[in-house]
Amino acid sequence: MSLARPPTSEPPPARAVVCQQPPSAVSSPAVSGWAARVILTPACRRRHRRRRYTTCVEPQALEFLPVLRLPLLRGEEHDCPYLPDRTAAELFALPLGVDSGTYRRLMDLGFRRAGQVFYRPSCPGCRECAPIRVPVERFTPSRSQRRVLRRNHDLRVQIGPPVEDDRRYELYRRYQAWQHQGRMIEGREEFAAFFCGSPIDTIEMSYWLGERLVGVGIVDVCPGALSSVYFYSEPDFARRSLGVFSALCEMEECRRRGLAYWYVGFYIRDCRKMSYKARFRPHELLGPDGRWRQPS
């Protein structure tokens, strides 16, 4: 395994588009359902199924809303995508002038980024989604994780800005057909918007076997932390456990940059697709009181 940054003098690959980061500040529209639908990218609208939004201030939001000055919207309730027979809802912060520093504060309030939207679960009667992060200096890979590192010693890792091209789009489609039965993002425009439409500092970590692209990770860069956004990989390489390998590489990049934490999204104990995150130890969970704690 080698971590490498592509030389800055080299142009991007043929037919590739190096995604430009949009401005960090935009004029504030009226806080309304219409405004929310305008700001959401097509990919995010599909992800959240074009629900209507209403202005909302939860008790917890009252503590930070005057400080961050972010409009908050609540999405309508819907079936939970992770746990059967549960109802879910999200609280959204509109990306009005959100920069990487503001997003770090939002993550410590339980928010995550999807495309150009910042959201956190606000589900009625349920608190199963627990934000999780790893203090990278104290992390020690397990025996099985060390085996994954050895298994992928022949891969090359390149770090740069997010790129939208034919290779990545086709790899993503194969991954979705294998992992999610193609239910998430369908069109090329939505793919570009979701992975390249970040309003904050974002990098891409791409994984190569020779000249073959086998995995892509999107990672947000914040003060003191990296945040793992999404990873997709070649189904033919399932035995390599590339998801675990990418997690270990992202933590190594945290160390290289001198950052303290790797944020991994939400941990859900009873959901197989989300419970694996607890295997990276030690880790910390964000409690209802807003404090990070290492589970006993």
Image (spheres, rainbow, N blue to C red):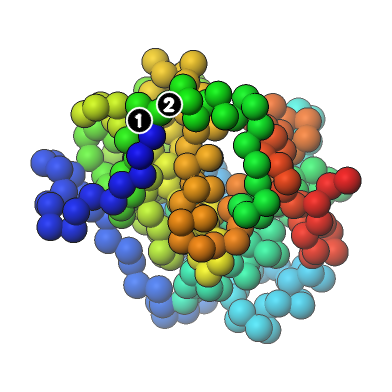
Measuring from the top left, give residue 211's x and y in whole percent.
Answer: 21, 29
Q: Mark 1 = which residue?
A: 155
Residue drawn at (27%, 61%), measured in percent from left and top? 20
Number of disc labels: 2
Q: Amino acid at mark 2?
A: Asn
Measuring from the top left, give residue 81's x and y in whole percent.
Answer: 66, 34
Q: Amino acid at mark 1?
A: Leu
Residue drawn at (70%, 65%), measured in percent from left and top? 109
Q: Is residue 252 left or right of residue 27?
A: right
Task: Identify which residue, 257 or 217, lies in the foreground.
Answer: 257
Looking at the image, residue 236 lies above or below residue 200: above
Corner quadrant of residue 75: bottom right
Q: Is residue 285 left or right of residue 274?
A: right
| Quadrant of image for the N terminus | top left
Secondary element under disc 2, as helix, strand or loop, is loop
Q: Which mark is residue 120?
A: none
Give the CA separation, mark 2 to mark 1.
6 Å
Residue drawn at (33%, 66%), measured in percent from left and top? 22
Q: Mark 2 = which residue?
A: 152
Looking at the image, residue 85 lies above or below residue 190: above
Residue drawn at (19%, 53%), measured in percent from left and top? 7
Q: Is residue 124 left or right of residue 274?
A: right
Asked if residue 57 can be seen in this view, the reply is yes
Task: Identify which residue, 217 or 64, lies in the foreground.
Answer: 217
Measuring from the top left, give residue 60's x and y in whole percent.
Answer: 79, 69
Task: Identify which residue, 105 or 71, lies in the foreground.
Answer: 105
Q: Is residue 1 left or right of residue 63?
A: left
Task: Identify which residue, 199 or 188, lies in the foreground.
Answer: 199
Tell me whether the residue at label 2 lies in contact with that at label 1, contact meaning CB atoms closer than 8 angstroms: yes
Secondary element under disc 1, as helix, strand or loop, is loop
